[in-house]
Image (cartoon, helix red, strand yellow):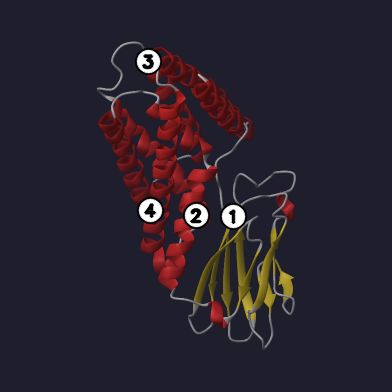
């Protein structure tokens, strides 16, 4: 009983955190250094930050010897683009920034800047193979997307709350994985005109449906993998939307896309294993386990409903 109470408290705390969270949206900074010391700068802020009270404070800071001539142009003189690159406003805008840098001779650097790593050293010694650098950066970004995108984690929890044997869980999670992987691939390489706000609302609505299915009496698992596959496509469109805002390195698009998806899958696997361990510790008595499952399903559904309404209202308020 004590273990069940502890597990319930931890999961409800996570759910209450999710109720106030927003989807993970990284920023991107593209730097193209030229032989004359000029640097072309392109910074794209995440949509979740744009328009917020502190969004204007989030901006890149050039190395000390460089002059910031404009938001899109730096001048670094004969020394070139070397030194410390940092970001102003990361404390008030805790987001990740993917840096895509290319020097005049074609050397590349792909790096991540965030609250845990607020700056990066630029220099010829920092340049590595472009494919490896892009792969590592986007692998970490994919994992961070799952960690920061609590709607994705809530949907995984809702799938597990359907109950059933490990083999049935595996089939459902696999179908969800196939769905979002295929959608991410297709939408990134051959994009369709899909309204982002509606995709985000459909993602949280999918959590409501999964939670309602978990609460429905009678057999629930026979067709679970089918709608998990369908909702996986919706979640994959959300992943693709985040990547579209971020952008992929032009010369390493497929490597970055594959690495991002592997990061998502790895973090998803860790999350599922963690939830399974918590569930196994939660209750060994069938009656208590069922009460815990239904209570969590109700909490997930209630929070996802509020989240869906919030996203729909936000969308309508910005279009009217």
In the rendered structure, which disc, 4 or 2, sits on the residue that comes first in sequence? Answer: 2
- In 3D space, how far apart are the residues under numbered discs 1 and 4 (Cα atoms)? 18 Å
**142 or 58: which is nearer to us?**
142
Q: Are marks 1 and 2 in contact (CB under 8 Å)?
A: yes
Q: Residue at x 36, y 38 (%)?
A: 233
In the rendered structure, which disc, 3 or 1, sits on the residue that comes first in sequence? Answer: 1
Above or below, comparing residue 170 to residue 75 in the picture:
above
SS at mark 2?
helix
- In 3D space, how far apart are the residues under numbered discs 3 and 4 (Cα atoms)? 36 Å
The image quadrant that residue 238 belongs to is: top left
- In 3D space, how far apart are the residues under numbered discs 4 and 2 (Cα atoms)? 10 Å
**249 or 301: which is nearer to us?**
301
Which residue matches tag 3?
Answer: 286
Which residue matches tag 4?
Answer: 262
Res 249 seen here: no
In the rendered structure, which disc, 1 or 4, sits on the residue that comes first in sequence? Answer: 1
């Amino acid at each position: 009983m004590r273990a069940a109470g502890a597990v319930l408290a931890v999961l409800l705390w996570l759910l209450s955190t999710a109720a106030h969270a927003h989807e993970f949206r990284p920023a991107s900074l593209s730097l193209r250094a030229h032989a004359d010391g000029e640097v072309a700068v392109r910074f794209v802020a995440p949509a979740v930050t744009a328009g917020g009270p502190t969004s204007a404070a989030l901006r890149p800071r050039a190395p000390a010897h460089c002059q910031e001539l404009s938001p899109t142009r730096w001048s670094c003189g004969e020394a070139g683009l070397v030194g410390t690159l940092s970001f102003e406003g990361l404390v008030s805008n805790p987001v990740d920034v993917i840096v895509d840098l290319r020097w005049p001779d074609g050397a590349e650097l792909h790096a991540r800047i965030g609250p845990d790593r607020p700056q990066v050293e630029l220099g010829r010694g920092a340049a590595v193979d472009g494919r490896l650098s892009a792969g590592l950066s986007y692998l970490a970004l994919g994992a961070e997307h799952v960690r920061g995108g609590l709607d994705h984690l809530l949907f995984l929890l809702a799938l597990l709350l359907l109950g059933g044997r490990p083999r049935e869980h595996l089939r459902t999670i696999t179908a969800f994985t196939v769905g979002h992987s295929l959608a991410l691939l297709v939408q990134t390489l051959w994009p369709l005109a899909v309204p982002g706000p509606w995709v985000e609302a459909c993602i949280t609505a999918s959590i409501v449906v999964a939670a309602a299915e978990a609460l429905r009496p009678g057999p629930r698992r026979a067709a679970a993998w089918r709608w998990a596959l369908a909702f996986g496509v919706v979640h994959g469109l959300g992943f693709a939307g985040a990547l579209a805002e971020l952008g992929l390195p032009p010369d390493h698009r497929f490597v970055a896309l594959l690495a991002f998806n592997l990061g998502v899958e790895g973090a998803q696997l860790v999350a599922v294993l963690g939830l399974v361990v918590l569930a196994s510790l939660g209750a060994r008595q069938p009656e208590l386990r069922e009460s815990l499952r239904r209570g969590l399903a109700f909490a997930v559904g209630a929070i996802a409903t509020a989240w869906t309404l919030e996203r729909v209202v936000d969308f309508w308020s910005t279009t009217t």
